């Protein structure tokens, strides 16, 4: 399939947005869901020696935040590679 | 040797190292002065961002805040780290791609408007100044306790050191110094944490001991017995709405902190910006997952050491004695029974400032004097690294954004550097003054800084990148709405301390307190700028081109 430069950039941007949105959904569910909105029901679930919502609020969410940023960097590296491969194929076929 | 002597020696050694680095990396042109010539490796930049980000608030105050708020202390733990996710995903890579010097640069160029640039520069200066006052308080506390010198002398020494290498090295010197400071900060934070964790639980890893030991459970029970709130239960100190709003305000406010955003201009590519963000959050996260353990363990130890003990015995303890002289710890045997009552009601006889929790932990746990000295050096490193980043940011807002871009577009490099250095000197004097005479409402001022950041800089940068149709009219209307709403509402809620009225003019904004209203300001900013931009002309073609280029993938020199 032939794509113009403009289309390729739009494809790249769309992929980027999709990735950001899915990571931010996790961010919101863990941070605001687990630690705030559902804090009371999750309080009754034990996680080792503490309550689950306490652990999420004090440590779990931070660990998830670190992972989200790591996943973003890794996925964007892959997207960059795909984009460059597309550019090279284009050059080769010209 | 006494604790004080070891502290002085250790602090002098670290100061000598910081100064040496400032000298080694001295610069002579403006671009190095502001952004370190984009030649700093990713890991070093990540450590520098972490040191810049983790202020006296993170090192000295946070574990104490968590210790006293219990579950609800999550507003700081999640607010400051969750905001970093927004910064790393939504702002940093694009601002690096844009590739100018400062935050007002992006806002001024993107919205083709000197008004927007000036508003952004003023917001930058205001946020940085309020933030720096907190750092100076941290420096004052450490000096007055550990060096037994007057706070005035302590602050002046600190400012002289910060000013010296900031003037000499600019951003490059600051970056390398901050990378070293990160390691001082983290070592100083972790070693006492390991020790107190091992003492209390037998497990030397505090991050795990928090969940695998029964200390938090026992702390909760003791607190309930003493009439305080249950440590582990949510929303005992703040309502659910306020926890939500304050966390969000801290997140958006942190993502909009200009001195942190500017760090992402110092890397060589967009990819390096993303990986700097990864390193920085790993470095920051290490302290943030330890802080809740330190908070809980220190609180347990503290209650165990002083509650229901004879007051004379308690006052004989060396650290109690020394903290009492600073005024941050007060014991008052109000009912005259000779016993320290540490309770959650009006029988309480202990007044304790949360800021001493981290600093006193090694003493409460009877650790070696060297560790106590190390913690003092760590607290200073945290305060000074953030202060230097803030100073450079304020300096560039004045000399670059206001002087060069608005008043004198023909200014030579030498002229700009001179204006920069004069600004830095003036900012240093103001910061020293604020440090010596801290405003009586420092906490409120910091809430204001985050609220204003959340209501102004964050939404406008976000819309500048992700909404191509956003124009000058929308952005300016949005900032003005967000800023004025937040300013007025915080002023009304805190009128008692700020204007000296007989009571707050309004208690809260529909249940949202002063630290959370920035979120409402932010939402108003989004709504107003969206509506205004849709009824006014679209941005010109060259601006649309600029947005395209900020979004486009980067074919970098590494050929990857």
Image (cartoon, helix red, strand yellow):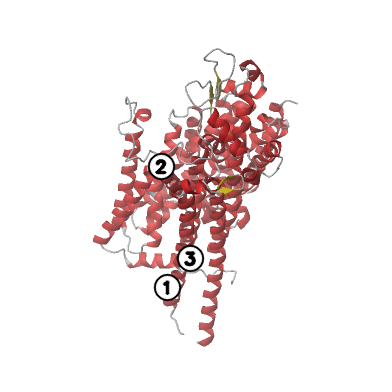
| Spatial separation of the CA atoms under disc 3 and disc 1 | 14 Å
Q: Which residue is mark 3?
A: A19
Residue B478: x and y in percent read 31, 51
Please tell me which of labels 3 and 1 falls first in the chain. Answer: 1
Q: Which residue is at the front of the view, A74 or B4?
A: A74
Give neighbour class at mark 3: few <14, some 14-19, many 20+ (Cα, 10 Å): some
Mark in front: 3 vs 1: 3
- Does residue B335 appear in this view? yes
Which dot marks residue A10? 1
Q: Quadrant of residue B127?
A: top left
Q: Residue at x 57, y 36 (%)?
A: B60
Judging depth in this view, the residue of B223 and B204 nearest the camera is B223
Classify A63 as above or below B395: below
At 49% from the left edge and 58% from the top edge, which residue is drawn? A26
Of B111 and B507, nearer the camera is B507
- Mark in front: 2 vs 3: 2
Q: x and y percent of residue B129 in the render?
A: 45, 39
Is the same chain shared between marks 2 and 3? no
Q: Which residue is drawn at the image coordinates 67% and 22% (left, top)?
A: B318
Q: Is residue B257 visible?
A: no
Looking at this rendering, what residue extends furthest in the top direction? B336
Q: Alpha-carbon neighbours of circle 2 within 10 Å: few (<14), some, or many (≥20)?
A: many
Q: Mark 2 or mark 1: which is in front?
A: 2
Determine whether the residue tagged by mark 1 lies in a helix, strand or loop. helix
Q: Residue at 45% x, 84% y: name it.
A: A2
Q: Which quarter of the rendering shows the C terminus of chain B?
A: bottom right
B232 displayed left or right of B374: left
Q: Which residue is mark 2?
A: B242
């Amino acid at each position: 399939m032939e794509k113009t430069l403009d289309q390729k950039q739009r494809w790249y941007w769309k992929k980027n947005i999709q990735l950001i949105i899915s990571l931010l959904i996790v961010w919101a569910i863990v941070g605001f869901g687990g630690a705030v909105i559902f804090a009371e029901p999750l309080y009754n679930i034990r996680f080792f020696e503490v309550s689950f919502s306490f652990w999420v609020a004090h440590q779990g969410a931070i660990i998830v935040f670190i992972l989200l940023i790591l996943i973003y960097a890794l996925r964007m590296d892959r997207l960059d590679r795909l984009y460059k491969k597309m550019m090279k194929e284009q050059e080769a076929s010209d | 040797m006494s604790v004080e002597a070891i502290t002085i020696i250790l602090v002098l050694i670290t100061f000598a190292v910081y100064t040496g680095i400032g000298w080694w990396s001295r610069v002579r042109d403006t671009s190095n002065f502001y952004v370190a010539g984009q030649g700093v490796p990713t890991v070093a930049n990540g450590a520098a961002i972490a040191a810049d980000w983790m202020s006296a608030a993170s090192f000295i105050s946070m574990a104490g805040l968590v210790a006293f708020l219990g579950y609800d202390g999550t507003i700081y733990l999640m607010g400051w780290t969750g905001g970093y996710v927004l910064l790393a995903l939504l702002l940093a890579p694009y601002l690096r791609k844009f590739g100018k010097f400062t935050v007002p640069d992006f806002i001024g160029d993107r919205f083709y408007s000197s008004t927007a640039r000036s508003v952004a520069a003023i917001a930058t200066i205001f946020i940085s100044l309020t933030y720096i006052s907190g750092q100076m308080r941290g420096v004052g506390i450490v000096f007055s306790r550990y060096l037994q010198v007057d706070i005035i002398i302590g602050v002046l020494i600190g400012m002289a050191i910060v000013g010296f290498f900031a003037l000499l090295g600019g951003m490059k010197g600051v970056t390398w110094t901050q990378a070293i400071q990160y390691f001082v900060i983290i070592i100083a934070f972790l070693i006492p944490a390991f020790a107190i964790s091992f003492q209390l639980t037998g497990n030397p890893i505090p991050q795990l001991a928090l969940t695998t030991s029964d200390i938090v459970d026992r702390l909760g029970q003791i607190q309930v017995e003493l009439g305080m709130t249950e440590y582990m239960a949510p929303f005992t100190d703040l309502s659910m709405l306020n926890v939500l709003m304050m966390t969000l305000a801290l997140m958006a406010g942190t993502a909009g902190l200009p001195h942190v955003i500017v760090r992402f201009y110092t890397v060589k590519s967009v990819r390096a910006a993303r990986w700097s963000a990864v390193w920085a959050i790993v470095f920051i996260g290490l302290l943030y997952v330890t802080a809740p353990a330190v908070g809980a363990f220190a609180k347990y130890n503290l209650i165990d050491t002083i509650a229901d003990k004879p007051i004379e015995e308690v006052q004989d303890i060396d650290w109690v004695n020394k903290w009492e002289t600073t005024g941050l710890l007060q014991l008052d045997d109000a009912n005259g029974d000779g016993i320290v009552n540490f309770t959650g009601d009006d029988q309480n006889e202990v007044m304790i400032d949360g800021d001493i929790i981290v600093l006193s932990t090694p003493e409460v746990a009877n650790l070696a004097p060297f560790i106590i000295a190390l913690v003092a050096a760590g607290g200073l490193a945290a305060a000074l690294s953030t202060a230097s980043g803030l100073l450079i940011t304020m300096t560039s807002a004045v000399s670059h954004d206001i002087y060069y871009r608005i008043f004198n577009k023909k200014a030579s490099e030498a002229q700009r550097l001179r204006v920069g250095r004069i600004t830095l000197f003036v900012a240093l004097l103001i910061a020293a003054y604020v440090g010596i005479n801290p405003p009586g409402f420092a906490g409120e001022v910091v809430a204001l800084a985050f609220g204003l950041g959340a209501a102004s800089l964050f939404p406008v940068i976000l819309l500048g990148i992700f909404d191509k149709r956003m124009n000058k009219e929308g952005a300016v209307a949005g900032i003005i709405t967000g800023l004025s709403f937040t300013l007025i509402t915080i002023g009304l809620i805190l009128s008692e301390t700020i204007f000296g009225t007989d009571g707050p003019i309004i208690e809260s904004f529909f249940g949202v307190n002063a630290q959370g209203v920035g979120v409402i300001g932010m939402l108003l900013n989004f709504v107003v700028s969206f509506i205004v931009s849709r009824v006014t002309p679209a941005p010109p073609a060259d601006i649309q081109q600029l947005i395209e280029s900020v979004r486009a993938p980067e074919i970098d020199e590494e050929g990857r």
